[in-house]
Amino acid sequence: MNKKEEQRIAAQLAKMMAMLCVRNTRLEDLHAGLVPVSRTGDFSDVRVIDADGNEIPWPEVSHLDDDEMKALMKQIVNRLYTFHLKADDPDFQRMVDRWAPVVEKWDEPEIDEFYKQKPHD
């Protein structure tokens, strides 16, 4: 298999895994709701006032707590696990085929900066 074909397959697989394993998870619940208006565009002009009256700049607000993060990561890990275990299952493959036209419209992936970092000792 040549490099271009390898990249095409990897891109298609990455987009399909994102669709089936990350999208439509608890992440959608976290995404739901009202988005504050920002006149600056960077949300530095938005503040949250908590129950104790503390005013917190939007960029410093944690948008999900530890329990929400744990539940989200557990669901994503379970979906990734299922994706790998069911890859050869005909019913699962039919589901993948149904979503293929959707992910084809997504932007092409790029190598993430995280993997360009030097390993830590």
Image (cartoon, helix red, strand yellow):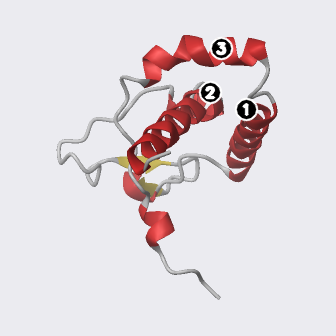
Mark closer to the chain start, 1 or 3: 1
- The picture places residue 97, in percent across and down from the top left corner, at 58, 14
Q: Which mark is residue 95?
A: 3
Residue identifier under label 2: 20
Residue lying at the far left in this picture: please name it: 40
Q: Secondary structure at mark 3?
A: helix
Is 107 located above or below residue 88 in the figure? below
Where's residue 109, x and y in %?
40, 44
Answer with left or right where residue 76 lies relative to residue 111: right
Report the side of 73 relative to 28 (left or right). Answer: right
On the image, numbered disc 1 is attached to which residue? 83
Q: Name which of mark 1 and mark 2 comes first in the sequence.
A: 2
Specify few, some or many for label 2: CA neighbours under 10 Å numbering under 14, 14-19, or 20 or more: some
Q: Relative to 96, does residue 74 appear above or below in the rendering? A: below
Callout 1 touching callout 2 (CB < 8 Å)? yes
Marks 3/2 in contact by CB < 8 Å: the verdict is yes
Identified by mark 2, the residue type is: Leu
Nearer the N terminus, badge 3 or badge 2?
A: 2
Q: Nearer the viewer, mark 1 or mark 2?
A: 1
